[in-house]
Amino acid sequence: MRLTRFTDLALRVLMRLAIEETDLPTTRDVAATMEVPYTHTAKVVARLQHLGLVEARRGRGGGLALTAAGRAAPVGSVVRELEGEGDVVDCEGTTPCPLRGACVLRGALRRAQEAFYAALDPLTVNDLVASPTGPLLLGISSRAPTGAGSSP
């Protein structure tokens, strides 16, 4: 299985926010820490807000914060939501596969995809930042340039 870049970045944003205890980073701060474009990060943050995993606070003292639901979210559920329920292979595309009516591969790939998600289900976002990952993330985020005066 391969995650989209969007899902990969979303998981890294959740992890970055999970280590924050006092300072609320802005979207620009998170983008700088993750070394990804601000525009990509802003789209990810908007989707995570829509899912109720992240909240953005505007104004002085504002920034991004992980919600309680975000901290406890099963990683498998987050990945399922971000990746969608599509098949691993597109048997029905613009040129449908002539084997689709009798193919066992499609079902096997569907089961493999679900096994992939199921392996992530026991992990929560908080689990992802347990040692040694959390302390490493803290070190990375403390070296990143800050986006003073930027919006969440």
Image (cartoon, rainbow, N blue to C red):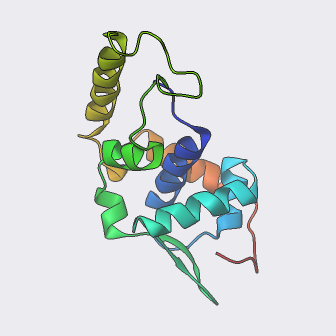
Q: Is residue 137 left or right of residue 82?
A: right
Residue drawn 54% across the image and 54% down it: 13
Residue 77 vs residue 22, the one in the foreground = 77
Residue drawn 65% across the image and 66% down it: 27
Q: Is residue 94 left or right of residue 21?
A: right
Quarter location, residue 70 = bottom left
Q: Is residue 3 left or right of residue 103?
A: right
Residue 27 vs residue 23, the one in the foreground = 27
Q: Is residue 146 left or right of residue 136?
A: right
Residue drawn 49% across the image and 26% down it: 90
Q: Is residue 82 visible?
A: yes
Residue at far bottom of view: 60
**Residue 54: x, y in percent?**
46, 68
Residue 80 vs residue 141, the one in the foreground = 80
Residue drawn 49% across the image and 15% down it: 97
Quarter location, residue 53 = bottom left
Q: Is residue 129 visible?
A: no
**Residue 84: x, y in percent?**
43, 44
Q: Is residue 118 above or below residue 30?
A: above
* Figure quadrant of the N terminus: top left
